[in-house]
Image (cartoon, helix red, strand yellow):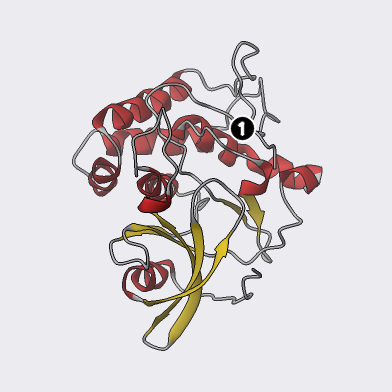
Amino acid sequence: MNPQAVENHLPKEEILKILKEGKTDLKGQFILGSNYTFLVQLKHQGKTFQAVYKPQKGEMPLWDFPAESLAARECAAFWVSEALGWELVPPTIMRADGPYGPGSYQYFIVHDPQQHYFTFDEATRQRLQPSALFDLIINNADRKGGHILLDKEQHLWLIDHGLCFHAQPKLRTVIWDFSGEKIRDDLLNALRILLDSLQVDSDIHQQLAQLLQKSELDALKSRILFYIEHPVFPPPDEHQRQFPWPLV
């Protein structure tokens, strides 16, 4: 299946509205990966774009993640990215009326699939500091090289966040470029703002409380606080498997 390259420059609020309310037309299935993933086309009030639909019923059972919870984690990653102001994750929502039942809908990013972490030049890799820190705080267990996209405007996007937010350490990523480096002050300031907002009944707290277990939300706060207090990118733990497989 070759997704049609439909480019849009819609405001984010409008993208989210269409994701929630647009009429769904199933276009095809992505055959790589363990879970069922579909390309859909959404139409709403004369506007059309493509999205990636991941139904909860299509999630393969895992021993360490609750059943049918991966789609919600996709959405949680979007809301954390938004709260940080880093715009790393494409707009993503939960929707109950998908072709195969409830699941996540994510705005499809037009990109060249031959471009990914392992093909990026050094200048592009150096732009991945926010992405590396994002994966640390959401405890990403599956940051493959192919999960980092570069669009035509050279904006970096992160996708596939079903295996995130576990309460226990699960980090597996290809982004270790910054090990031993100090975390930038602007990134730390964003962490502080996020942590403050998670301590009260804010919009982001309410969103995440609907998508994650309390223990997972508490663990998220603990990881954020850890990196505020220890502002250095860690190296991979030689006693843990901290690289995903496959790498791309």
Task: Pick the residue in front: 70 or 186.
Answer: 70
In the image, what residue occupies the spot 63% across and 48% down?
148
The crowding category of the residue bearing disc 1, from other C-alpha atoms within 10 Å (few below 14, some 14 to 19, many at least 20), is many
Q: Is residue 90 left or right of residue 182?
A: left
- The amino acid type found where label 1 is placed reads Thr
Residue drawn at the location 59% of the way across and 38% of the way down: 143
Residue 141: % across, % down: 52, 32
Q: Quadrant of the N terminus?
A: bottom right
Q: Is residue 199 above or below residue 204?
A: above
Nearer to me, 225 or 58? 58
Where residue 94 appears, as percent x and y from the top left, is 33, 57
Indicate whether 188 appears above or below 231: below
Depth order, front residue of 176/71: 71
State left or right for residue 164 relative to residue 109. Answer: left
Number of callouts: 1
Q: Which residue has dot 1 on it?
A: 173
| 108 left or right, relative to 83 | right
Residue 30 image position (x, y, % from top left): 58, 60
Quarter of the image for the C terminus: give it.
top right
2 relative to 76 in the view: left or right:
right
Q: Is residue 115 above or below residue 169?
A: below
- Residue drawn at x 67%, y 63% is 111
Mark 1: which secondary structure?
Answer: loop
Q: From this viewpoint, which residue is outermost toward the top? A: 239
